[in-house]
Amino acid sequence: MTGEQIAFLVVALFTLASGFMVVTTGNLVHAALWLVSTLFGVAVAYALLNAAFLAVVQVVVYIGAIAILFIFAVMLTRKDLLDQGPQVNRNWWVGALLSVLTFVGLYSLLQGWDGMSKTAADIPSGFDAISELGNELVSPMGYVLPFEVASVLLVAALVGAVYVASDRK
Amino acid sequence: MSFWNDPLKVAADWLLGIFTGWGMPEIAAQILIGFIGVLLLITILMVLDIFLVWVERKVVSRFQDRIGPNRVGPFGLIQPFADIIKLIIKEDITPAGADKVVYNLAPMLSMMSVLILWAVVPLAPVILGVDLNIGALYIVAAGAIGTLSIIMAGWSSNNKFALIGAFRQVAVMVSFEIPMLATLLIPTIFAGSMGMGAIIEKQDIWFVWLAPLGAVIFLIAAIAELGRAPFDMAEGESELVSGYNIEYSGMKFGMFYAGELLHAFTFGGFWAILFFGGYRFFGLEHVSPFLAIAVIVFKAFLGYWVIMWIKYTLMRIRIDHMLGFNWKFLTPLAFALLMVTALMNALLAGTPTWIYVSIMFLSNVVLGWVALEIARSYSRKEREKAQGSKAVAIVEAAHH
């Protein structure tokens, strides 16, 4: 086993264990903090895959914005900060079914994929991943259309949020 | 290659020779050397941090027309050590009902979020932790961890004031992150890279001449990110006692405090790196890496001094003004500046340097002037509206 594999296994175990804690912890703020550690584990996995940009964006967007927003929402909507609510509601079986289906779907997809036993090709020296990514995002042959559609969607969400928040006079 | 030209490499090679001489495999030795390097950097930073306490107290006392610490040691230099002994032997109190693990984790995360910033700080051409090609984004990511530590501290203390302080601080940090990110992209446009090393290497002309407005916006956003006056709403002594760190005692409070000072110094350093040429000063950096370190430390202290100057001169701003200032003025201005800079950079490609620099400088000045004019006319309208309604109220009161 190479050092890279050991590192991956440790990170994967950490991420899975944190993810498990997210859904089993009774305290909502603790669950949100475990979610942060799960997201951090994913960021480390990106870093192990030489995707430094994705790793940092994962931290900035998911930990710096989304997780903080979760914590805010939990703190502002709960009466008691240390409460332990019921873990499941009447729809628990829908969630369970969806997660089992997702797992089965991913498993069957990966069954037919031959990348499991391959080793990754070495990145050529002087390969600048971030400028490649930037060029792909704005080149017409690349991903400019999905990129622009996503930004229009985000602007629409932003405008909608401002409209909902402003008091109409 | 001598020690004076590349001290880190010489030291690392020397240690590698010793460790492999002991029969250690080379890869293990290299990992160990990496750890020693990190430990050394952190130790130097923490020792520097001790003196920052002294610097901060001396500077604030001068601004307030006092002398400051002057009893323990020459010029009061030993004072911070006395403070440390006091902090360590203080009783360590954990409030009843506190969430123990989160409560104890928060000061560590706070300090860590500052220390990890130094991984990307180039102290000299050959002395840097790692030349990440996403250095600018890395700064923001480290700031995200700092934000997290504050909300953890505020929530786990089980104290209303701490929680309110944390809410305010996090609201400010999350909002001012946006103009900061936008202004971080301006040196990125000039240098064609987000790496700190590349940004410094490109500054034959300091970027502050190309983007004076960007430098100012970055400084404002950095001060807000630090939670220092005039943006220290989270502390608000008169209403919140001390904000998110109110329940912390002894060295745990010391970690927050030292973290804040080091953070301010670090942002002084980043201001210098991004806009004032970092370790470059008329070719001094090529003479010796040690001179380069001296230059960047001097510039970082200058930036730190400016941050302190602002802190001890301006009054606290109300939280709604602070957020309104950010969302309605600073953020649009930062994005407008980013667009203008990108456009100008593309239009002026290939022009002589002096034309490029002067047009960049002028476009910054014009943009800043237009923004201030818009803000002024808006505030005049608001004031007229407010005074008008007040006049109406007086007339009505007279009728009754």
Image (spheres, coloured by chain):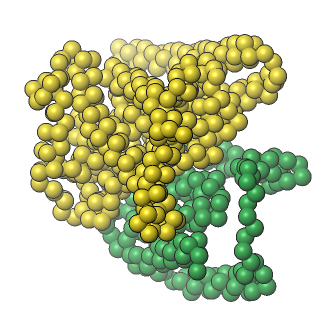
Chain colours: A green, B yellow
Image vertical order of residue B162 relative to residue B62, above or below: below
Q: Nearer the viewer, residue B173 or B218?
A: B218
Q: Nearer the viewer, residue A146 or B107?
A: B107
Quadrant (top left, top right, bottom left, bottom right) of the N terminus of chain B: top right
Instruction: Report the side of A84 relative to A126 (left or right).
Output: left
Residue name at image x 14 percent, y 45 percent: B85
Q: Nearer the viewer, residue B1 or A157?
A: B1
Residue name at image x 29 percent, y 41 percent: B47
x, y (%) of residue A153? 73, 51
x, y (%) of residue B321? 44, 30
x, y (%) of residue A13? 51, 77
Image vertical order of residue B171 relative to residue B55, above or below: below
**On the image, which quarter does residue B363 sit in?**
top right
What count of labels does the image hold?
Answer: 0
x, y (%) of residue B65? 21, 14
Residue name at image x 53 percent, y 83 percent: A92
Residue at far right of view: A141
Image vertical order of residue B23 relative to residue B196, above or below: below
Image vertical order of residue B154 relative to residue A74, above or below: above
Instruction: Report the side of A52 relative to B73 (left or right).
Output: right
**On the image, which quarter does residue A34 sit in?**
bottom left
